[in-house]
Image (cartoon, coloured by chain):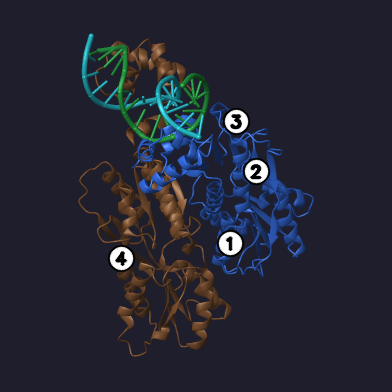
Chain colours: A blue, B brown, C cyan, D green
Amino acid sequence: MASIKDVAKLAGVSVATVSRVLNDKGYVGQHTREMVEQAIKELNYKPNEVARSLFKKQSNTIGLIVPDIMNPFFPELARAVEDTASKFGYNVILCNSDEDRLKEQAYLDTLQQNYVNGIIVSSNTMTANQIIELNIPVVSIDREISKGLPTIVVENMKGASEATRFLMNKGCSRIAHIRGPQGVVNAEERCEGYREVVHQESWFSESYIVDGDYDMESSIEATLELLKTHPEIDGIFAANDIMAIGAMKAANQLGIRVPEELAIIGFDGIRLSSVTIPELTTIVQPIYELGEKATTMLVSLMNQQEVGQTYYKLDVELIERNST
Amino acid sequence: MASIKDVAKLAGVSVATVSRVLNDKGYVGQHTREMVEQAIKELNYKPNEVARSLFKKQSNTIGLIVPDIMNPFFPELARAVEDTASKFGYNVILCNSDEDRLKEQAYLDTLQQNYVNGIIVSSNTMTANQIIELNIPVVSIDREISKGLPTIVVENMKGASEATRFLMNKGCSRIAHIRGPQGVVNAEERCEGYREVVHQESWFSESYIVDGDYDMESSIEATLELLKTHPEIDGIFAANDIMAIGAMKAANQLGIRVPEELAIIGFDGIRLSSVTIPELTTIVQPIYELGEKATTMLVSLMNQQEVGQTYYKLDVELIERNST
DNA sequence: TTGAAAGCGTTACCAA
DNA sequence: TTGGTAACGCTTTCAA
């Protein structure tokens, strides 16, 4: 690979001059510039980004830490981040943390050692301190790590209430909730939103809320159990789409028809949700927008630009399909 | 961030010595080593990977180029690549190419400029020349770019035949095929596998093969059309799972029951396929293994180790579920 | 308008 | 067993 020296030699100028035309910075004579550009073309020269990074202490790269890219929520997010980053000239390093504190810290370290300009992270376990010590702009996404840190989340509670109310309006008179894991902020919020709507209903009891793990297995099991103990249930709000699908499967196993005998609504709006038969009614998050916004905000932060707002709570939208 | 100089100063030795203990290379006295380690701990020193990369002309990073991480096939692949890379001490840069030649070349350039040690790529449009000019180890995955380049694919044709034969054994007497896009190697192969089994059947005609685009929309449309012109069809082999799901949807729209009146089988074994009701019978590819194998092979290549085989064709497996 | 040279943080060679 | 130093490829300051 040709280096800046080769270009300089061929063009008969100094490396400083080449650097100037490369970066379009400082004075360069018209003729000199042409010579240099010619040489660059001739050698098919491309600047070495590593050397640049070393000097600049920045690598034009941003780190993206997600729990698990196989979780259907994250590919769309990752795509948005990559698209946006790319638009601004940044590359993306992908890190799967498995919500494991050690892995998270290891990745944080590596990213720092690689001079990433910024980091986007989705985590429940990370602490504000870990982030502050990094001394690198970080935007937290989907899950709030700490007030004060730049964060982009969605209206979990509002969406959950909306979902629950929607089921009531559809005529459901016994609505259960399959909640997400204990300790996960958005699971708590969604549960809270459900609770807000039903808590004063005469039929409501705590046993209408069952634990799920944001995956299909846990949900199938929970739903089976739920429908056995509470055959009167005619509506289920699941805290995410995967669990809603699990609930549909459980109902199917029990020969309960959806939506005729049991209405089911999910949360997230992942692509999966339009794949089932019947298609799932759900609260859709603007996933792509989430990633996009996080990235543009991060870019501003990295450029030390004035960033007005550092906390966004994006709105969600109920999309009615055929499961309700 | 502390640098090697700071460590050297604190330990009262030269940077050369620090470098030696860091890399466990060359002679270092026992006592000296302890001093240095102490200093490292004290300063919480972590070597600057960018400086290392510059010197080594390698960045301990591998590039992963996929058409679109939102395509459900790729997250699992990406995960496998990341896991394996991580195990060997490499980071992964994620690139979505959209099968766009320009984007692909741009990414190839950036990766090279960033001194990635190697690249894993899934592409139909890339040429062998593009790769050779790079002068970096590249493994092609899922799709073959050129004989001679390290490649990992699966038994597309065999799997397709197996799927088709399976439908016949299930009693289907008119089997159609929704094929993938023209020009995509694995789509061709799968179509070939289907053809091999049915071509001498008396009922077979070319109109039993319809074009799809590896996505759900195209498949719904194609299936609708297909079932209208050929109401006698009682079995469909779709070239991937998404299209198989599309076929299920189309059947559902027409009030045709799956599997009673129409058996459907897919190809890929993405997670989605177990989410539908009924669950999809499909030819599952070892996606994770694909990514894992590609990465280990790439690592060997990067280390200039003897790599016996550079072409793998992994086996696929028919998993029977409820759509057949 | 241009060039020389220092510096970014490492590693590895050669000398001591 | 250790240290000095050139080199990796670039940017930027300062002088010319």
Quarter-of-image position of residue A274: bottom right
State the residue position of label 2. A152
Camera-side residue of B65 and B274: B65
Camera-side residue of A262 and B214: B214
Q: Are marks 1 and 2 in contact (CB under 8 Å)?
A: no
- Residue A233 appears anywhere in the view: no
Camera-side residue of A208 and A304: A304
In space, the residues marked 3 and 4 are separated at their CA atoms by: 49 Å
Give x and y (percent) for residue A207.
Answer: 67, 50
Q: Secondary structure at mark 3?
A: helix
Q: Earlier in the sequence, mark 2 or mark 3?
A: 3
State the residue position of label 3. A128
The chain containing the residue under callout 4 comes to B
Q: Nearer the viewer, mark 1 or mark 4?
A: 4
In space, the residues marked 1 and 2 are separated at their CA atoms by: 23 Å
Quarter-of-image position of residue B191: bottom left
* Left or right placement of residue A66 versus residue A231 in this view: left
